[in-house]
Image (cartoon, rainbow, N blue to C red):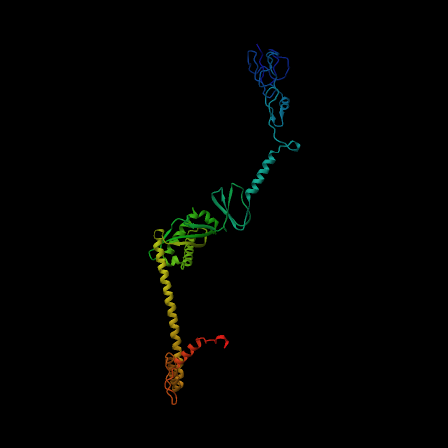
Amino acid sequence: MAGKRNPWGKPGSSGGNGGGDDGGDGPSDDAPSSGGGSDGPRNPWLPGGGSGGERGGQGDRPRRSASIEDIFKNRGPEGPRRAGGGGGGPNFRMPTGPGGRSLFPLAVAGIVAVWLIFSSVHFIQPQERAIVTWLGGRYSHGLGPGTNFTLPWPLHVVDVENVSEIRLERIPENAQEEKLILTADQNLVDLSYLIRWNIKDLTLYRFQLAEPQDTVNEVAEAAMRAAIAEQNLDTVLTGEGRANIELNVRTNMQAVLDALESGIAVQGIEIEKTDAPAAVIEAFNDVLAARQDAERDMNDARRYEQQQLARAEGEAAAFNNIYEEYRLAPQVTRQRLYYETMEAVLSKTDKTIVEADGVTPYLPLPEIRRHAQEAAATPQAQPAGGQ
């Protein structure tokens, strides 16, 4: 029977197979026996400690326990070597720097420093604003232009927005789509327009409205319908009232958006198209043509009226002048008026009557003048053969 051995110390000297070969000073008789000449528990830190490869040539010779020197002899910089036949398996080694120090802490420190710099320092441009939230949810504070510092991500999440950019909204979005609006005279007009707006308060813009763009469109449509309902169809189509409509829509939109605390500023409204509905466009064009003809006739009548009025005013002024002269010298004025009247009447007749002594009562001056003109128009005959 094999003697009892201590599995953690050197074999005892109480007999058995090779019980006193190694000497040893550790306890030997107190450990439980494995029985039957089989090996007891072995130290895994010794070479070959994980297998029973020392059987055979030496029989059931028990292995000695590992001492502290053996443990540190089989330990490398990276820790205990893997147990096995001679420790020939692959070992993982961390990269080291000068003096055998590991570079892993330095790499981790560099990554952390870069993360802190890029997530804590923020450069905001003059046309930009930013808001800071806790973990991307609850509002913390706002950032203005310049260099700003926050807690690193993800504690502080920074959202930067260009607040000076002019945003455009076209209603309707499709140019081919028909947008009918009722006018004050119960007519329909197909109208499309453009909205220009930007952000004036980023905090209100982000947290006050769920859908800012949809809100702008709905407020603009309500304001445009209210403005068109106050104008007649002719005013809307001819463009005479477009400026007033655009100003009215912008004012009403800004008032509503300010009441909603939307943080949006309306920069302008531009009406792009005003047409009649497609179903009645031909008849509407005929009506417009008739109105243009009527307007032209009215302009001609006004021009004739101005001419006649100017002529009457001139004649009235001339009469007043003559009356003033008549009041100064009535007889002279009467004689001058008589001469002027007779001159105007006799200039249109072919006969001239002169009532004076020694003068032929009838002198056909127009006949004499006509004969003289005919004689002057007839070419004189040239003598033949130069005679």
Q: Residue at x 39, y 52 (%)?
A: 221
Figure quadrant of the N terminus: top right
Q: Residue at x 38, y 66 (%)?
A: 300
- Of 145 and 301, nearer the camera is 301
Q: Residue at x 56, y 41 (%)?
A: 116
Q: Residue furthest bottom?
A: 357
Q: Residue furthest right?
A: 99
Q: Position of residue 31 (x, y in %)?
A: 57, 16
- Of 276 and 362, nearer the camera is 362
Q: Residue furthest left?
A: 186
Q: Position of residue 152 (x, y in %)?
A: 54, 42
Q: Residue at x 42, y 77 (%)?
A: 374
Q: Could you tell me if residue 232 is visible in this image?
A: no
- Of 165 and 110, nearer the camera is 165
Residue 324 to residue 186: above or below:
below
Q: Position of residue 41 (x, y in %)?
A: 57, 17
Q: Position of residue 182 (x, y in %)?
A: 35, 54
- Left or right: residue 306 versus residue 142 is left
Residue 38 to residue 158: above or below:
above
- Left or right: residue 289 versus residue 44 is left
- The picture quadrant where one finds residue 101 is top right
- Of 37 and 306, nearer the camera is 306
- The picture quadrant where one finds residue 253 is bottom left
Q: Could you tell me if residue 249 is visible in this image?
A: yes
- The picture quadrant where one finds residue 16 is top right
What is the tally of numbered marks visible in this picture? 0
Residue 53 to residue 255: above or below:
above
